[in-house]
Image (tube, helix red, strand yellow):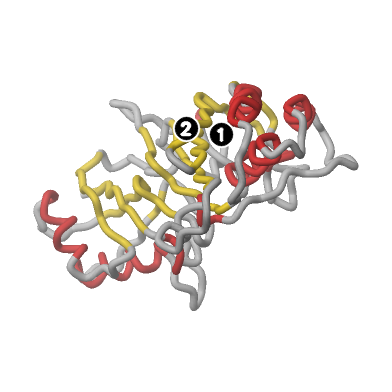
Amino acid sequence: MRLKLVVAYDGTDFRGWAAQTEQRTVQSTLTNAVRLVSGEEIEIQGASRTDSGAHAKGQVCHFDTHRGIPVEKWPSVLNKVLPPDLAVVSAKKVQPEFNSRFYAQDRWYRYRISTGDPDPHRSRFHHCYGKPLNLERMQAAAEVFLGEHDFRAFTEELDFHTLNTVRKIFRFEVNRVRDEVWVDVVGTAFLRGMMRRMSGAILEVGRGYRPVEEVSKLLELKERENIQWPVVLPARGLCLMRVRYERRPKDSRLNKNLKDPQG
């Protein structure tokens, strides 16, 4: 049967989601745990290839197994052998063709920016700017990102000339929560570094470094012209909150703009 897992992790000590030779990654750590429990040479595929140091509360992955462990028992069985910074939240049996990456309808990311004093108890999970920010300007800039745009100015990919860099943003909110500013974005899929660079642009607007109007210009660029690109904020402030699927999931690659969604 094919199992869908929802997993959470503190990404600080992982080199991202995707397996890498001789590196501690979420995918390889989880794969080893499932192989240990099942005794099978399974392969795990995830919905999003989160960056090194980024976190997740709702990462989704899937794998196939012939082991007769009841579905509801998989989280507790796996959590017994997983390290403290990685946990399985839930397990569910899905149809054989389900693909956690390509069947995802949208993904919700949150970036946290602290405007208060440094706090070692939270430093692993937010970017500490440490100064007041203009929330109204940040919210105005957030509205610019809504809808379908070419995000080539907001990716770290080197071959952006050949990539399909069009993505659709359904929700982009900026809110103050105590001494933090939370940037919440829901979109079809995200290019490498896209969420961290969009958050960097929002931060630059909030600190008065970049006018709101310049965000629109960045989305209209067809080449990487002589312009100051938004900063890519550290991964520690980024968290994958949720990956959502339709009640009857379908392959997102049928969408011409999502032939190879990065997550």
The percent position of residue 129, horizontal first and vertical second, equals: 60, 50
The percent position of residue 25, horizontal first and vertical second, equals: 44, 66
Kind of residue at disc 2 = Ser
What crowding class fits label 1: few (fewer than 14 Cα within 10 Å), some (14-19), or many (20 or more)? many
What residue is rendered at 43% in x and 54% in y?
Answer: 55
User: Residue lying farthest right?
Assistant: 226
Question: CB of mark 1 within 8 Å of CB of mark 2?
Answer: yes
Q: Is residue 21 above or below residue 114?
A: below
Query: Residue 21, labelled with which disc?
Result: none
Q: Is 165 displayed left or right of 238 in the figure?
A: right
What crowding class fits label 2: few (fewer than 14 Cα within 10 Å), some (14-19), or many (20 or more)? many
What residue is rendered at 31% in x and 63% in y?
Answer: 42
Kind of residue at disc 1 = Leu
Query: Residue 252, labelled with which disc?
Result: 2
Q: Is residue 103 above or below residue 78?
A: above
**Alpha-carbon span between mark 1 and mark 2:** 6 Å
Q: Is 141 displayed left or right of 181 in the figure?
A: right
Residue, disc 1 = 258
For the residue pair 238 and 258, the one nearer the viewer reads as: 238
